[in-house]
Each structure stands twice: as structure tokens, then as C-alpha cells.
Amino acid sequence: MSFINIALHPSVSKALTEQGYSKATPIQQQAIPVVLAKRDVLGCAQTGTGKTAAFLVPILQMLLEEGSVQRHPYIKALVLAPTRELALQIAENAQALSAHTTIKHAVLFGGVSQQPQVNKLRAGVDILIATPGRLKDLMNQGLVSLKQVKYLVLDEADRMLDMGFIQDIKQIIRYIPADRQTLFFSATMPPEILKLTHTLLRNPVKVEVTPVATAAEQVTQYVYFSEKQQKASLLLNLLGNEAFETVIVFTKMKHMADKISRFLNKEGISADAIHGNKSQLQRQTALERFKRRRTRVLVATDIAARGIDVDKLGHVINYDLPQTAETYVHRIGRTGRAGSAGTAISICSHEEKPLLAEIQKLIKRTITVARIPGDPQKN
Ligand code: AMP
């Protein structure tokens, strides 16, 4: 059985097989032929749907077909992503999918020394993956030229808007030739994003999979009602269940992430925290340890967790409910990926009940209320 009904370059096919991607996901089935037909794409898809390969596979294919991959590469494809984590994730995918080609990629993000990134750029790259801030910095220093870019990808555009990157993006795009092909992905389409698509895309083909509401259907969801003071002991109680092998615990606040992680370690449960106040190295180390199952629990804030992709992540626990229902869907989308089973548990205090109502409205279902046996909780 082939990955998709299109003959892909053997080196790309080989990489797909090695990655265990035997069949294209719905977004890949829709997007790959459209990209190969040189059309602009407006993709409405969240992380977890396989959207990274949906743009990387056809870009690799086109670069290989053009035969433009030379000994001295120059930037032909630019992928913009909102966070370092997502940029790294995309770079990992690019690495895996281009493993049997001579295509070179580099990843740029802030918070780390720029010199190694500059060295990599000087050596030449075909695909550049970058967060807008660092890219703009390097462009201002005359270290990056986008004059030859033919393929532009904006990933998680709605997050870029949330994080205040839109002006940077507009500035960056001015330096990219107008006759490029643009692939634009966003999980949600608020009005500002739609406006941006009108200026950036030319007659795009819209590809859309699992609207936010249905993405949540792959994940088994429970809610426990607990007052704030009891949340820590409820969390401990839940983690007493060994079936919770790898768990991301979400919290809105950075200091809370630290506090929970310290508490769990004290209770003999290995945990690390990642949030915006941690250095890039600390974040990467924590993530690596978690991926290798050295730590059982990763306590994360929403921004830090963007783009995190952990194989077979069984459980997501919302220590508190997020401010928006969309964020809830993003959080629980960390589990139940690419069709595997996942469970999301939310711990909801009395004050958070209106947020729960918003979430249930968005996902169009009532989340099952659960109780720890013997715990006389009230609703
Ligand atoms: P993404 O939405 O790009 O972050 O991908 C979500 C997860 O699905 C990642 O772990 C990918 O490695 C995985 N994935 C992507 N495409 C496929 C595929 N065709 N078959 C199986 N897994 C895939």
C-alpha cells in the first residue's frame, strides 16, 4: 500500500516508510496534491493532524524534482513558526524526511547564541525553519537573504498573532519574491488571520481537517471537581495509578508549574517543569528527558507546550482550566495523536466552572464527571 496516490521521489518514500508513515493522514491526502499542483494553500488544521509532513513532503518533492539542490544551497523554502519548540519539531521532521537526500535545512530561534546558526546559514541551506524574531534580527544584520525563496510556509498563524508576531511577519515577507507559493496553516481563523490570508495568498485552495470540535473526539475526557487547595493531593492520587506512564500536566502560571514539579519530586514522582522563564537549554533538556521516559511528568504552561510532540503520550492533566476553550483543545491534542488512544483529565474548581461550560460548548459534548473512589467529592 502506498502512502499516497502520487508517485513520490524514492528518497522521500523511503523516509516515510522509515518513519512508519504507511498511509497519509487526511490533511496530507488533501494538501500534498494541491501543493504539488503549485497552488497556494489555506490549511485549517491543528498540530497532531500530520500537518508538518503535509507541507514538508511536497516541498521536498518539488525541490528534488527541480534538481535545484546544489552543492552550494541557498534558501528556497522558508517555514515560519511561532515558538522554538515548534520550530525544532518541524526541523526534526525535516531531518527525518530529507535523510536520504542532499537537501539541507537549518533552524533559527531566539534565546540562544546566534553564531552557530549563522555558521550553518553560511554553509548553505535549502530549507530554513525560523521563529520570526530571530529571523528578523539576522535579516537586519544582513546575514540572511530571502531573495530566492519560492516556498513560504506559515505554521500556526493564529499563535503567531497571539504572540504579537504579525508585524514581524509582514516585514519579513516583504523580502520574499511575490511569485512564491504560500502555504498557510492555522488551527483557528479569527478575523485578523483571515485578513492576513487575503493579503498573502493568491487564490488559495482551502484544506480543512477535523475542525477543532471533532479533534477532541479522539481523546477520552474526564473532569474531576476539586477545590483549589485539594488539587495537589488529587493530582498525586491520580498519578498513583501506574497506567499514567507519561503525563503532561498543564497549568496557566509559570510559578505554579515550578511548584507542582517540586511537589511531585518531593513525593517521589519524577517531574520537570517547562515554561517561558526557563532557558532554551533547560527546556530542551527537560523535553528530552521526558521523551526518553526519564521523567514521568512534564509540567508545562501553554506557550511552552506549543509544538511539543511526544510519541504515545497517554495522559494530559489540566491542573487548571485554560482561559479559552481553544487552548483546552490544543492541550488535549497533545495526546491521542495520529489515531492513538489518549486520555485528558481536567481538575476544575468551583470558580472554573464557567470555563468548563465554554469548553463543553466548543467541543459539543459533556465531559464525564469522575470521582476518586472513596473520595466524597461534591459537584
Ligand atoms: P503534526 O501534526 O505534524 O505535529 O504530526 C503529529 C504526529 O503524527 C507526529 O508525531 C508525526 O510524526 C505523526 N504523523 C504524521 N504523519 C503521519 C502519518 N502519515 N502516519 C503516521 N503518523 C504520522
Image (spheres, grey):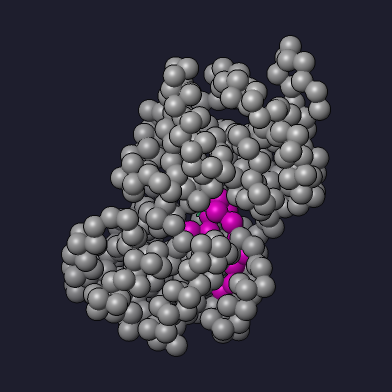
In terms of depth relative to the viewer, which is nearer, 227 or 112? Answer: 227
Q: Residue at x 36, y 34 (%)?
A: 289
74 relative to 81, above or below:
below
Residue 141: in magenta span? no
Instruction: State whether residue 171 is above or below residue 16.
Output: below
State the image coordinates of residue 369 (x, y, percent, origin top left): 77, 30
Residue 44 drawn in magenta: yes
Relative to 146, 328 lies left or right: right
Q: Which residues are magenta?
A: 41-53
Q: Position of residue 88 (x, y in %)?
A: 38, 54
Would you say residue 41 is visible in this rendering?
yes
Residue lying at the far bottom of the rendered structure = 178
| Depth order, front residue of 339/291 | 291
Taking the spot 56% from the left edge, 39% from the top edge, the residue there is: 250
What percent of the width, then of the height, locates residue 377?
Answer: 77, 20
Whether residue 329 appears in this view of the structure is: no
The answer to which of 27 and 11 lies nearer the viewer is 27
Q: Residue 147 vs residue 368: left or right? A: left
The vertical placement of 206 against 264, above or below, is below
| Image quarter of the C terminus | top right
Q: Where does residue 361 sit, x and y in percent of width and height? A: 80, 50
